[in-house]
Image: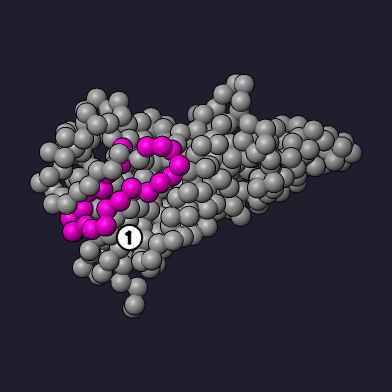
Amino acid sequence: MARQAYMTETDHGGSGPERPGTRLRRLVRRLLHGWRGDPRVWRRGAVLAALALLLALVMLLHSHIPNRVGNLGSLSETFLPWLGLAIPVLLVLGVLRKSATALIAVLLPGIVWLNLFGGLLTDKQGTGGDLMVATHNVNADNPDPATTAQDVASSGAALLALEELPASAVPVYERTLASTYRYHAVVGTVGLWSKYPMTGVEAVDIKLGWNRAMRATVATPEGPLAVYVAHMPSVRVKMEAGFTARQRDKSADALGEAIADETLKRVVLLGDLNGTMNDRSLNAVTSQLRSTQGAAGSGFGFSWPASFPMARIDQIMVKGVEPESSWTLPRTGSDHLPVAARVKLDTSS
């Protein structure tokens, strides 16, 4: 009996096993069967096309979405990259609807999304840098602060910023980190641990009434470096008020003023800003500094929530130094992921 099962004609006229590429072409032909000569192919899918155009406009004009109602503009900017998930959904629906109009319309949000975030899809990390820094919101309710401290110290960072430090846990962090970091300072609920001497440690007033930001001058081998550690007020999503961030925005403006008054040329900001680089409410800060993740990272570098990161609200930002690489560190007992970066302080060459 001749064996002909699972055989198909080859390009050379013979027979052989059916290749995956051949099956894909047959599937595409079946999906598109009946489109030719169908006058409704351009009339169907008007709703899908409208949704695609609306999606493109939201991404393209996100900075014009007003914040007056529930801070809707900042909310959309916080999760802006995730709007791209709607594009393949619209694409599939356009194919199933057999609508050429919808398929062409879907190209527009795809182009806009790639223009906004395509650069983050490439790996821009380098191997250089003369200083590694890290920052971590350790979570005030962290059940095991000692292990968290050990985990972030093992990263090898020369400068380590910690936020959301409860007074009861500060001695634990100090004891655990003492063998790795000779110098440290804690101001309110934020702290900085350093392998290099620190001077000029002071609180930075971010208009809260208590201390959640600090500044120090670190004497690195390449010269003095101004290091800011900040924990912006939390934002809330409330049914009756939407995305409430008034206090966060006020604090961001105050932090921006402090950085603008900085006299040192080289500046590093470490902390939980409770906002992404796209959030217009952080313009007072983001307009002055570069994100290490955006300049030298791989991917989006989402840091929160640790269980399923959806946004990068923990930031490392610099001025007067060159980012070389940026990444997230493994999960600890916190609800945030630690983030780290390697920068080049000596930019003369």
Q: Position of residue 263 (x, y in %)?
A: 38, 66
**Left or right placement of residue 300 versus residue 57 in this view:** left
Which residue: 53% across, 42% down? Answer: 249
Q: On screen, 220 above or below 340?
A: below
Query: Viewed as shown, does residue 231 lie left or right of 77?
Result: left
Instruction: Name the outermost residue toward the top.
Output: 239
Above or below 81: residue 241: above
Query: In the picture provided, is 48 more to the left or to the right than 330?
Result: right
- In-front residue for pair 10/64: 64
Image: 242 above or below 287: above
Q: Quick check: can you spot residue 262?
A: yes
Look at 76% across and 32% down and name the residue there: 97
Magenta extent: 189-210
Name the image colouring.
one colour
Amino acid at pointer 1: Ala
| Residue at disc 1, secondary structure | strand
- Quadrant housing residue 127: bottom left
Q: Quick one: which residue is furthest to the right in this view?
A: 39
Give x and y (percent) for residue 18. Answer: 53, 40
294 to the left or right of 69: left
Taking the view exactly as shown, the residue that stands out farthest to the front is 209
Quadrant into which the C terminus falls: bottom left
Residue 327: image location, x then y, percent: 35, 49
Instruction: In the rendered view, tell whether residue 251 sits above or below residue 121.
Output: above
The stretch drawn in magenta includes residue 40: no
Look at the image and tell me whether residue 38 can be seen. no
Residue to which mark 1 is pinned: 226
Which residue is found at the position 56% from the left and 31% from the top?
244
Q: Residue at x 29, y 55 (%)?
A: 216
